[in-house]
Image (cartoon, rainbow, N blue to C red):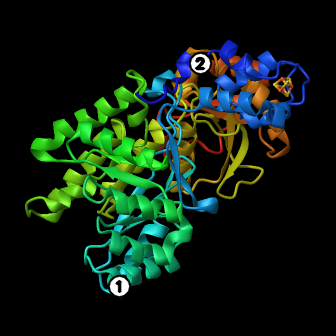
Amino acid sequence: MAEHRKSIREVSPIDVYLRLPRTNCGDCGETNCMAFATRLVNREVLPEACPPILQPESVQAYAALSLLLAPPVRAVTIGTGDRAIVAGGKYVLQRHEFTYSHPAPIVLDVADTLPEKEREDRVKAISSFSYQYIGRDLTLDAIAVRAASGDPDTFRRAVHQVASLTDRPLILCTLDPKVMAAGLEEAGTRRPLLYGATEGNWKAMADLAITHRCPLVAIAPGDIALLRSLVQTLRSCGIEDLVLDPGSFTDDGLAATVQAFTDIRRAAFEGSDGLLGYPLLGVPMAVWLGEEMAPELVQWKEACLAALLLTRYADMLVMHSLEGWTLLPQLIWRFNLYTDPRRPVSVEAGLRPVGNPDRSSPIIITTNYALTFFTVESDLKGGHADCHLLVVDTGGISVESAVAGRYLTAATIAGAVKSSEVERAVDHRYLVLPGLAARLSGETEEATGWRVLVGPKDSSGLPGFLSTKWPPVAPP
Ligand code: SF4
């Protein structure tokens, strides 16, 4: 049994405190060591923020602290520089226990048998794939170059071309060490992930990983015991940066695949099995190797397998389909899975222009829940409305919940009106409240001194509302 890396719930501030210098010197910016220990447990700071523990006399304490705080699933870095990606580094089995760290990289494959121009187009399409989702730019993370040819020279040329076209991290995919060595001649300094080591080739692959200082995938489809043994062997060679591929099967193998991923992850957390405490690689593109069928059906199967594996418990995915309808569900699901469940996704409060507002444009009230804000903004832009959007800080909570929880009140609206100095931006004194906050209209008029118009319950109705109700008719 390898060493037991504790889950985040098993580490207490006292455990951490006992490994700190305990001088309360304040060099970390905290008032004492206990306060720093609490922040370390919450992963709000790094141990390196305590200068005394980095001194030579504290080497052992630093090592003990690092081990204590190491996640049960190792974090493995692929690539170098700003574009490097990290797989794994999980502190908890379930997202709601804390938060998932290091969103699972989504990797697209490129075969070395593709004609050069097609390969160039595919690499460019992968690198430029982007989707705006509630203010975030969702993109693909890396490229897996597959040695479908089995020929070292062909693979070397393909790796050279891909590496020169993109700064995305690479995965080099071949089970033949000679072919892998050829690919590494072109990309060895970029710290690619090597895919990979099996029961049959592990020695030669381990040598390549050590020589080029690259992370390595241990592959044992459908056999967790063999996978564990392979990890033990590779670790005994001195390789720690490992990624596990327990096999991704579809159709009749789907249930067993999800079960294997789950068993491995549970073994790392609940069974304290350090040999299985490594990132898991899901390969939804394996569906393309099955029986021939319509491409749309294979893409659908790939999308389903990818979503299942993201959920349980893949730390990285290799996919083939570049279709938006296959990839977008994964990107959005990943985004939601890896947000901090303790903090709603929010935007900054304040006054935002939409279109080209002037001094006669309406002021629309909304909350700073990201999904609400971007939906309202998108609906207004879609209707070519020119207005001022006054975003009230509701702690990242949507309109209806914020009204119910008293995060959106006449007082918070009045506070937003005051702090934004919106009266300087317009000549009128009207606010448009969301229809779901209609019951605040009277109190808001009293608290702000502004007249209130109640807008539609759904922001998709805002353009129509403004076209008929704005400018307002002043009461006689
Ligand atoms: S810098 Fe280190 S020793 Fe000093 S108070 Fe902070 S945690 Fe304690």
Disc 2, ligand 1: is the CB inside 8 Å?
no
Front residue of this view, candidates 258 and 392: 258
Question: Residue flagged by tag 1: what amino acid is it?
Answer: Asp
Give left or right: position of 347 versus 114.
right
Q: Which residue is mark 2?
A: 11
Q: Residue at point 22% right, 56% down?
A: 286
How far apart marks 2 and 1 lie (CA) works out to 51 Å
Q: Is disc 2 placed on a helix, strand or loop? A: loop
Q: Is residue 231 visible?
A: yes
Mark 1 Cα shell of 10 Å, populated few (<14), some (14-19), many (≥20):
few
Vertical placement of residue 333 versus 447, above or below: below
Question: How far across and how far down the image is residue 183, in percent?
Answer: 41, 75
Locate residue 388 relative to residue 73 in the image: left or right.
right
Name which of mark 2 and mark 1 comes first in the sequence.
2
**Label 2 crowd (10 A; few <14 / some 14-19 / many >=20):** some
Of marks 2 and 1, the one in the foreground? 1
SS class, disc 1? helix
Looking at the picture, does residue 138 appear above or below residue 161? above
Image quarter of the N terminus: top left
Residue lying at 85% horizontally and 43% vertically, measured from the top left? 424
Q: Residue 273: give x, y in percent of width and height.
A: 40, 28
Task: Name the residue beneath numbered marker 1.
Answer: 153
- What x and y, as percent, mark residue 426? 79, 45
